[in-house]
Image: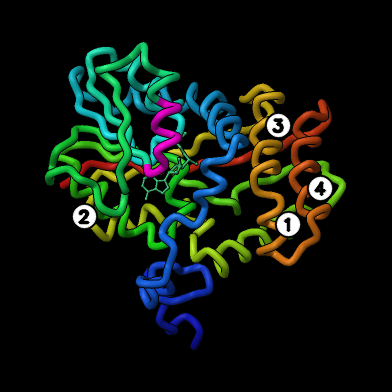
Amino acid sequence: MAEANQPRPTAQAQTPYNLAAQTVSDPMTKDLNPQKQHMGDESMVRTLAAQTEAIWPQERELIATYRLPATAGVLDVGSGTGEFSARLAEYLPQSKLLGVEILPQSVTYARQHHGRLAPRLDFKVGDAFALEFPDQRFDFVTCRHMLQSVPEPQRVIAELIRVTRPGGRLHLLVEDYGMIHAYPTRRELDGFWQRAMAGFVNAMHVDPRIGRRTWTELHSRGVRDLAVHYITVDTLRVPRDTMARIFESWRDGYANTVAELAGMSSDEAYAGFTDMADCIRDPQGYAVWHVPIVTGLKA
Ligand SMILES: C[S@@+](CC[C@H](N)C(=O)[O-])C[C@H]1O[C@@H](n2cnc3c(N)ncnc32)[C@H](O)[C@@H]1O
């Protein structure tokens, strides 16, 4: 058939959601940290606490399969409040870990809350777009829940690879807002997420579907032994209260922005998140957020 001979789109083809192509045109004017207010908001402290509580039990099992060197040098990029870095430091008791984070107040928070693990675990201010480390410096490089929030995430990915030693491991936990489902809900929420994502793409030039794109980004840069694992944050594996708190804190931090960027009323945006949280709290409801972790070894 004629259609079968049509060239298939490549990873570089420009589509409305292919930010790799879309965002290189105006690098001088783009805000590379368009969510700084959200990231520094009180609600983000709750978000990161609930997310890590939900995800770490499954993520720890995955990390166990990596067989990291006992004394691994670890870099956690975009370390936020340090919830993950601290759990990792406890899990790898002979490792040396550094969390790099662009917001000074988050670095202060992380240092204060995880000081018991210092100096083996430290946090410092730094920019993922220009890491201040020599090439091939770390055994294990992690980046979680960050790449969906910055334009041109491929530039950060290149930096993560640069500072990983050959044979060292990359561990990228990447969000994708097309991987969230709930039933029953009062509203049809697939459309809600679609509209919210389109708003973020158009206004902030970020990629809310970075989760499905990351394998290709790493593959095209020669990372080997690539695998994609899914953390299943659902109402069967995660306590309902923990999971609901994720969507409630997202709502508190992001509903007004979703309303503005997606052309919804504030009430509508607020109700979308609340609907999701209510389904999770309803013993008759089922909800799931699939969270990809893309991992591989630097060649
Ligand atoms: C959603 S939080 C995730 C925090 C942590 N990785 C976790 O999993 O709990 C994303 C973090 O990345 C930080 N961030 C954003 N852009 C950054 C950049 N260019 N360099 C370093 N950190 C950045 C934000 O300030 C925020 O603290």
**Quadrant in which residue 122 is drawn:** top left
Looking at the image, residue 164 sits to the left or right of residue 22; the answer is left
Res. 244 mark: 3
**How far apart are the alpha carbons under marks 1 and 4?**
10 Å
The residue to which callout 4 is attached is: 271
Please name the residue shown 87% across and 47% down the image.
Answer: 186
**How far apart are the alpha carbons under marks 1 and 3?**
17 Å
Would the CB of label 3 be found within 8 Å of ligand 1? no
Residue type highlighted by circle 1: Phe
Q: Position of residue 21 (x, y in %)?
A: 39, 73
Is residue 196 shown to the viewer in this render?
yes
**Mark 4 vs mark 2: which is more N-terminal?**
2
Residue type highlighted by circle 3: Ala
Would the CB of label 1 be found within 8 Å of ligand 1? no
The magenta-colored residue range is 102-110
Res. 192 mark: 1
| Neighbourhood count class around disc 1 (C-alpha, 10 Å): few under 14, some 14–19, many 20 upward | some
**Mark 1 vs mark 4: which is more N-terminal?**
1
**Vertically, is 80 above or below 53?**
below
Q: What predominant SS class does the magenta segment belong to?
A: helix
Which of discs 2 and 1 lies nearer the camera? The answer is 1
Looking at the image, residue 244 sits to the left or right of residue 40; the answer is right
